[in-house]
């Protein structure tokens, strides 16, 4: 590897080659999935002594690995970032590195990754970073996004117990709260509003989607098609802005929403651009879910303004809904009970 050989000139050349593919996942003919390209950009930037760029790319690599549900690559990239932070030695770097090593080490124990665990132990010894006191394994419902802050939602009868920013409040159960719980359980994963609309309802997704594909009118009317096209324009601008700010997780979620909308338009228009007919179930779901989430956020704002501010900045509703915490301000969520399972 170029970075292992400390080949500065080679690292700079390869960095420029890989940079256009920063949002992609690397694959090898023999190894298969090799993790996020952002991870390799971070290692190459570090070799070239571009430490700040390296940190940005490695954080993006962690976020990308979380989105593709690859905890092994999350742990490996956490180790890479921790190593870099300890070398940089800036304000807060040592604490952040220790936290990253704690999380990576926990993954090694869970998945059985002795080689990486040995590297972590060696780095701890070399840099005098103490190992954490072992804790019990997380319970079902824990969603871990590397970071120091955290929150919890627990459904207790007809009320939710909500903990965030050292404040615990109780909020009445509602469709909006159930949608938020589902999104917080799966950070970075886009959910069609059609699925979120029926949380707790009977039947299966295939039944509802079949109903949505009936012949009760155009699949998308003129207003919906215009709104979709306007949204596509907004998404292009938002994606470009997120890329410029180095927000890889946000850019990835926006691209998935764009792909979903593009697919909906393609499905709704037949030959010659003529509208296909179908039910309006999907559009009603979009409106209902958006309205329910907005109502829940108003209630949350009255009880815990800090949580409302966080959710308003990280939860996006529409034809697809997604929770995308900023990788620079990571958070751990625990959602307890069985509030979001379908009946």
Image: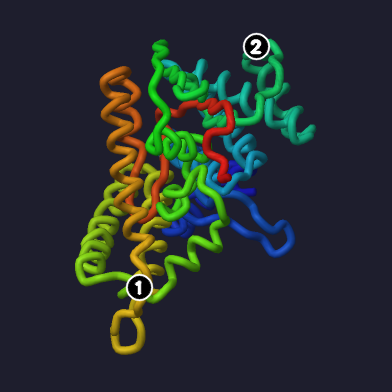
- Judged from the image, the secondary structure of the residue bearing numbered disc 2 is loop
Above or below: residue 74 compared with residue 24: above
How far from the left and from the top, in percent, is residue 289?
35, 46
Left or right of 7, for residue 231: left
What residue would you read off at disc 1? 216
What residue would you read off at disc 2? 130
Colour mode of the rendering: rainbow
Above or below: residue 212 compared with residue 298: below
Residue 228 seen in the current view? yes
Left or right of 262, for residue 241: left
The image quadrant that residue 217 belongs to is bottom left
Residue 49 seen in the current view? no
- Judged from the image, the secondary structure of the residue bearing numbered disc 1 is loop
Marks 2 and 1 sit apart, C-alpha to C-alpha, by 64 Å
Rendered residue at 51%/23% (across/down): 157
Q: Looking at the image, which is closer to me, 123 or 164?
A: 164
Mark 2 vs mark 1: which is more N-terminal? 2
Q: Residue furthest bottom?
A: 272
Above or below: residue 162 compared with residue 278: above
How far from the left and from the top, in percent, is residue 7?
57, 46
């Amino acid at each position: 590897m170029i970075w292992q050989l400390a080949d500065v000139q080679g690292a700079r050349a390869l960095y420029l080659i890989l940079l256009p593919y920063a949002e992609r996942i690397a694959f090898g003919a023999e190894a298969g999935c090799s993790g996020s390209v952002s991870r390799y950009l971070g290692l190459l930037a570090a070799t070239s002594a571009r430490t700040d760029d390296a940190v940005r790319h490695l954080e993006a690599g962690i976020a990308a690995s979380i989105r593709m549900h690859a905890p092994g690559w999350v742990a490996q990239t956490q180790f890479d970032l921790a190593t870099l932070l300890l070398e940089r030695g800036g304000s807060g770097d040592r604490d952040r590195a220790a936290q990253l090593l704690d999380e990576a080490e926990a993954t090694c124990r869970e998945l059985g990754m002795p080689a990486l665990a040995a590297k972590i132990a060696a780095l701890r010894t070399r840099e005098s970073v103490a190992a954490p006191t072992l804790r019990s394994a997380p319970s079902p419902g824990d969603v871990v996004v590397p970071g120091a802050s955290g929150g919890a939602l627990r459904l207790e009868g007809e009320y939710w117990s909500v903990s965030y920013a050292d404040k615990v409040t109780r909020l009445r159960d509602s469709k909006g709260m159930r949608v938020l719980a589902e999104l917080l359980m799966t950070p970075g994963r886009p959910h069609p509003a059609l699925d979120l609309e029926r949380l707790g309802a009977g039947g299966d997704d295939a039944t509802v989607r079949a109903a949505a594909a009936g012949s009760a009118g155009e699949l998308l009317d003129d207003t919906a098609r215009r709104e979709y096209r306007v949204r596509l324009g907004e998404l292009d601008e938002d994606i470009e802005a997120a890329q410029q700010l180095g927000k890889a997780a946000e850019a990835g979620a926006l691209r998935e929403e764009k792909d979903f909308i593009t697919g909906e338009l393609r499905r709704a228009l037949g030959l010659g651009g003529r509208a296909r007919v179908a039910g309006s179930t999907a559009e009603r779901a979009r409106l209902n879910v958006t309205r329910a989430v907005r109502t829940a956020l108003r209630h949350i704002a009255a009880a815990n303004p800090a949580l409302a501010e966080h959710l308003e900045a990280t939860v996006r509703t529409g034809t697809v809904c997604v929770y995308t915490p900023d990788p620079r301000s990571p958070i751990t969520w625990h959602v307890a009970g069985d509030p979001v399972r379908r009946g």
